[in-house]
């Protein structure tokens, strides 16, 4: 049996030596205990440091280490898809190179697949120790929100660290959409999933590539990709304002017929016009988000472009 280890890498020159050292220890344990061979697919997502040089050097030292280097930075979602698409394993595990996804959990994950019949074993953090308070607060709000408005289950604290069967991975590969949100895709395709919990682990080296702005943009992509609720809310607001406007028109007509039409109330009129104009622009913006995603999908552009690789399909 073959296990494919998919590792997206973006400017991970400091973390990679530590990661390889740790994962190789676990590889020896798993080979002895489960008789499973390893292949590594390290995806260089357009790094601007020495990540690619390190990957090339590793591929020369270890025959089961393969790398794929993109022509530019396409994002982690593209790197995940490239890893899945090029993997050969009967089992596939996706993990980060910064050791925030503990390799020591892998034997237990394999045991759950073999002994309990799960299609995937996923991980979630039960704490956010070391993470900025504001980021943690908004992350929890996002998980609560998207689970209410989406038909895809996304577990709070879920990591991308996940062990999957070949059938599970093939189902993901079949979803060839350009705008990808893996956490939503994992939940949408279904299958039987076991969740393992662990304490948050800080990066072994380097800095996170996910700023608050990038995470906010990523969360919006997830909402747009797996829910049409924002469009429904915009429509509902439009209906409510329409009803309110009819009531106001009737009120003004009755007041004018009864008391005349003195010139007054222009400040409130300006406020109402500004409010309605803001709601209209917000609704157009929501519509624009969905339209832009549709536009990108219709172009049929590739999810990623390979510049260099030693991997043979």
Image: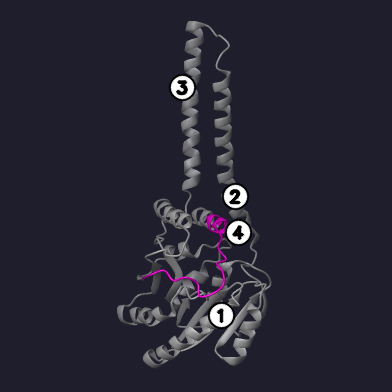
User: Could you tell me residue 195's position as x and y percent?
Assistant: 35, 70
Mark closer to the chain start, 3 or 4: 3
Quarter placement of the N terminus: bottom left
x then y, percent, for residue 49: 66, 74
Secondary structure under the numbered disc 3 in the rendered image: helix
Residue tagged by mark 1?
A: 16
Q: Which quadrant is home to the C terminus?
A: bottom right
* Up-down relation of residue 252 to residue 198 (above or below): above
Q: Which of marks 1 and 2 is nearer the N terminus?
A: 1
Q: Mark 3 points at which residue?
A: 247
Q: What element carries label 4?
A: helix
Residue 298 position, x and y percent, is 62, 58
Between residue 127 and residue 221, name the one nearer to us: 127
The residue that disc 2 covers is 291
Query: Which of the marked residues, 4 or 2, is nearer the chain's N terminus?
Result: 2
Q: What stretch is highlighted in magenta?
A: 198-217
**Disc 4 vs disc 2: Cβ atoms closer than 8 Å?**
no
* Label 1 – label 4 distance at C-alpha: 34 Å
Circle 3 crowding by C-alpha within 10 Å: few under 14, some 14–19, many from 20: few
Q: Is residue 291 above or below residue 155?
A: above
**Number of other residues with Cα within 10 Å of mark 1, as a class: few under 14, some 14 to 19, many 20 or more:** many
**Residue 297: mark:** 4
């Amino acid at each position: 049996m073959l296990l494919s280890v998919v590792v997206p890498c973006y400017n991970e020159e400091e973390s990679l030596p530590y990661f390889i050292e740790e994962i190789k220890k676990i590889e020896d344990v798993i080979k002895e205990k489960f008789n499973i061979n390893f292949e590594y697919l390290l995806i260089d997502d357009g790094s601007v440091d020495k990540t690619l040089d390190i990957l090339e050097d590793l591929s020369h030292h270890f025959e089961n280490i393969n790398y794929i280097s993109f022509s530019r930075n396409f994002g982690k979602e593209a790197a995940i898809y490239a890893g899945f698409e090029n993997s050969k394993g009967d089992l596939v595990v996706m993990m980060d190179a910064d050791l925030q996804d503990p390799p020591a959990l892998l034997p237990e994950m394999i045991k759950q697949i073999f002994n309990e019949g799960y299609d995937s074993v996923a991980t979630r953090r039960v704490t956010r120790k070391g993470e900025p308070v504001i980021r943690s607060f908004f992350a929890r709000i996002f998980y609560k929100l998207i689970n209410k408005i989406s038909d895809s289950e996304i577990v709070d604290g879920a990591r991308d660290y996940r062990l999957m069967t070949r059938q599970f991975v093939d189902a993901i590969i079949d979803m060839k959409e350009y705008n990808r949100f893996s956490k939503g895709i994992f939940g949408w395709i279904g299958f039987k999933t076991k969740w393992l919990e662990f304490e948050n682990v800080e990066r072994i080296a380097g800095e996170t590539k996910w700023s608050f702005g990038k995470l906010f943009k990523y969360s919006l992509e997830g909402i747009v990709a797996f829910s049409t609720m924002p469009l429904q809310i915009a429509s509902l607001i439009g209906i409510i304002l329409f009803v309110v406007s009819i009531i106001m028109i009737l009120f003004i007509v009755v007041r004018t017929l009864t008391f005349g039409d003195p010139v007054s109330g222009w400040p409130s009129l300006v406020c109402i016009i500004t409010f309605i104009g803001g709601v209209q622009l917000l609704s157009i913006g929501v519509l624009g988000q969905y339209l832009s995603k549709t536009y990108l999908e219709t172009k049929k552009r590739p999810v990623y472009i390979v510049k260099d690789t030693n991997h043979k399909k």
